[in-house]
Image: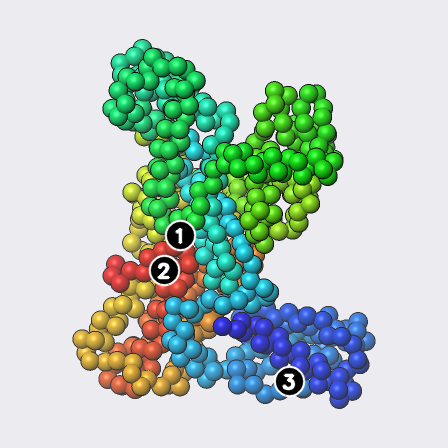
């Protein structure tokens, strides 16, 4: 599929060449033509500020340039009207007849409508999206759930835009946090066997009590009197295995699946860390200070730049350095996208600098920071989980509102905006609930086809030229925005754009349904409108699938 804006841009650019050839514009190399939607839709479907950008090159007033360009625009079947507005905008309105014909295009493309075999604005890239990567010390929290939905939806968008995408979860299975988790599991294990052991200082949620009971049931008192180091290593491995399995279950609940669960420990086991460290040494990017090894940086006092502690143990930052080497150099990704919580903002520059220190292209790294999620009921915050401790889990929220509502709600704000998820709103079966409003559009379409079938009506032979009602044409306009939304949201890493679009598309359909009877005594118009409705169903379903949501036939 071609992006319509690109076709229009090329068409407008040709008018520059024609005007120059006829002496109405002086010779110059035309700049890129920007085609955008005007803020006020009454001005048209698209607009370009090109004439303002040409004023210096042409040595003419923008309004004069615009008028000359319009005179030399060749006739085209998809543009009905071109107008000029002060101070030099060129506004373009699509032809209603051409718009109606696009119903056939959507029907032909089906599930592929809105996707691109290659990216519309460049070459396909081998992309890795690494997301969630929460420490494997407990269930998936609702905060990490936002990370999951952002990362997974972005991956879907990038695939739709023509890129090759790998989804990855980075398992932090090295360091103090997992050591403390092992000690906490041992305490719960011993308690399950009736031992008088103090509650762990960390990881006090009931999930660990259950885990301790399961270990006791499976292994008995085998590890009560064992050698401490071996016992804690067993507890560490057992806790990691069980929690990663739990995380896989939690992510599957919201239809998030990873191509790889990447172990931090593997970076040390397979020599990647050693290789990256030696690379930094060769490039003279390490310095010894206060008994530790630091990465050279502008801020010598930043202790987060320590690579090796004074006791010889590599830091988390050392693993981050090895991991970015693994992504860009070893596995050859063209683009590495990280989705992090906003509390990691201090690590952004550090990671980029470490890539440069390794001789890698830091431009291949994109880091998306997302803000907190507040769970409420009718605006009143829900502060604590009964089962997990002082955090709300994804599993609990899915059990209450369902996967679709959770995914949609967690996408409704840009990543850099804090958000509120109201559980009661997410369950409402009314137009106040955006999830219901959008999915009801798909279910309503299914009901139209059930009615058509019961009355013997089909879309066979339908002539889309009969689609002339303003609300029919407006619905097609909205459908044709899907490729544009996919391209823009993928390029700007803005998956929340899908939720806005889905509501606008559903609104256009509901408006059409209200004023335009689909199945009527007019067989020809019925067939045409059934084609329109089928195209709307395809577009809405493709949008829902991009958000990882189901396409209900009934509600």
Q: Are the residues flagged by discs 2 and 1 in contact, CB closer than 8 Å?
A: yes
Asked whether the residues under the numbered discs 3 and 1 touch, taking CB atoms below 8 Å apart as contact, a structural biologist would say no
Give the labeled residue for mark 2.
438
**Residue drawn at (56%, 67%), measured in percent from left and top?**
120
Q: Tell me residue 541's x, y (percent).
A: 36, 64
Q: CA distance from mark 2 to mark 1?
A: 10 Å
Residue 214 left/right relative to 50: left
Pointer 3: residues within 10 angstroms few (<14), some, or many (20+)? some
**On the picture, is 107 further left or further right than 314?**
left
Mark 1 neighbour density, 10 Å: few (under 14) some (14–19) many (20 or more): many
Q: Quadrant of residue 312?
A: top right
Q: Nearer the viewer, residue 285 or 59?
A: 285
Q: Earlier in the sequence, mark 2 or mark 1?
A: 1
On the picture, is 512 further left or further right than 216?
right
Q: Nearer the viewer, mark 2 or mark 1?
A: 1
Q: Which residue is mark 3?
A: 73
Q: Position of residue 311 (x, y in %)?
A: 61, 20
**Mark 2 residue element:** helix
Looking at the image, the residue that sits furthest to the top is: 196
Residue located beneath label 1 in the image: 408
Figure quadrant of residue 141: top left
Q: Earlier in the sequence, mark 3 or mark 1?
A: 3
Label 2 environment density (alpha carbons within 10 Å; few <14, some 14–19, many ≥20): many
Residue 296 in sight from this viewpoint: yes
């Amino acid at each position: 599929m071609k992006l319509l804006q690109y076709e229009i841009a090329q068409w407008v650019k040709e008018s520059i060449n024609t005007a120059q050839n006829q002496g109405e514009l002086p010779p110059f190399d035309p700049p890129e033509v920007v085609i955008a939607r005007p803020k006020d839709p009454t001005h048209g479907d698209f607009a370009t500020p090109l004439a303002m950008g040409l004023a210096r090159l042409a040595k003419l007033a923008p309004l004069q340039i615009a008028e000359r360009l319009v005179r030399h625009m060749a006739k085209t079947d998809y543009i009905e009207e071109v107008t000029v507005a002060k101070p030099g905008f060129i506004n373009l309105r699509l032809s209603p007849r051409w718009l109606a014909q696009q119903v056939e295009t959507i029907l032909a493309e089906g599930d592929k409508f809105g996707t691109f075999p290659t990216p519309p604005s460049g070459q396909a890239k081998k992309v890795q999206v690494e997301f969630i990567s929460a420490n494997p010390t407990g269930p998936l929290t609702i905060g990490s759930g936002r990370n999951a939905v952002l990362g997974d939806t972005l991956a879907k968008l990038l695939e739709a835009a023509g890129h090759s995408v790998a989804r990855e979860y980075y398992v932090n299975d090295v360091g103090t946090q997992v050591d403390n988790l092992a000690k906490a599991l041992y305490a719960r294990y011993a308690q399950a066997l009736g031992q008088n052991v103090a509650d762990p200082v960390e990881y006090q949620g009931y999930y660990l009590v259950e885990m301790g009971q399961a270990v006791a049931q499976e292994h008995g008192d085998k590890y009560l009197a064992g050698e401490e180091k071996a016992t804690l290593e067993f507890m560490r491995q057992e806790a990691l295995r069980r929690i990663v399995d739990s995380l896989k279950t939690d992510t599957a609940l919201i239809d998030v699946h990873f191509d790889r669960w990447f172990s931090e420990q593997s970076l040390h086991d397979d020599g990647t860390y050693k290789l990256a460290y030696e690379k930094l040494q060769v490039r003279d990017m390490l310095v010894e200070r206060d008994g530790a090894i630091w990465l050279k940086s502008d801020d010598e006092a930043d202790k987060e730049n320590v690579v090796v502690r004074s006791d010889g143990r590599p830091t988390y930052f050392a693993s981050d350095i090895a991991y970015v080497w693994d992504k860009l150099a070893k596995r050859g990704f063209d683009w590495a996208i990280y989705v992090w919580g906003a509390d990691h903002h201090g690590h952004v520059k550090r990671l980029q600098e470490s890539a440069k220190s390794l001789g890698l292209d830091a431009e291949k790294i994109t880091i998306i920071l997302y803000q907190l999620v507040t769970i409420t009921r009718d605006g009143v915050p829900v502060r604590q989980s009964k089962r997990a401790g002082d955090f709300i889990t994804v599993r609990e929220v899915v059990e209450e509102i369902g996967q679709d509502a959770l995914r949609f709600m967690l996408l409704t704000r840009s990543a850099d905006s804090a958000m509120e998820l109201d559980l009661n709103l997410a369950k409402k079966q009314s137009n106040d609930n955006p999830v219901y409003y959008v999915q009801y559009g798909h279910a309503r379409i299914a009901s139209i086809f059930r009615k058509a079938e019961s009355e013997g009506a089909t879309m066979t032979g339908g002539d889309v030229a009969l689609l002339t009602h303003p609300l029919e044409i407006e619905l097609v306009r909205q459908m044709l925005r899907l490729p544009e939304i996919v391209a823009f949201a993928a390029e700007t890493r803005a998956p929340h754009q899908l939720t806005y679009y889905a509501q606008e598309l559903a609104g256009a359909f509901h408006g059409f349904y209200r004023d335009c009877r689909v199945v009527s005594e007019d067989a020809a118009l019925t067939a045409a409108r059934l084609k329109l409705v089928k195209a709307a169903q395809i577009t809405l379903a493709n949008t829902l699938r991009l958000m990882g949501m189901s396409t209900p036939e009934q509600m």
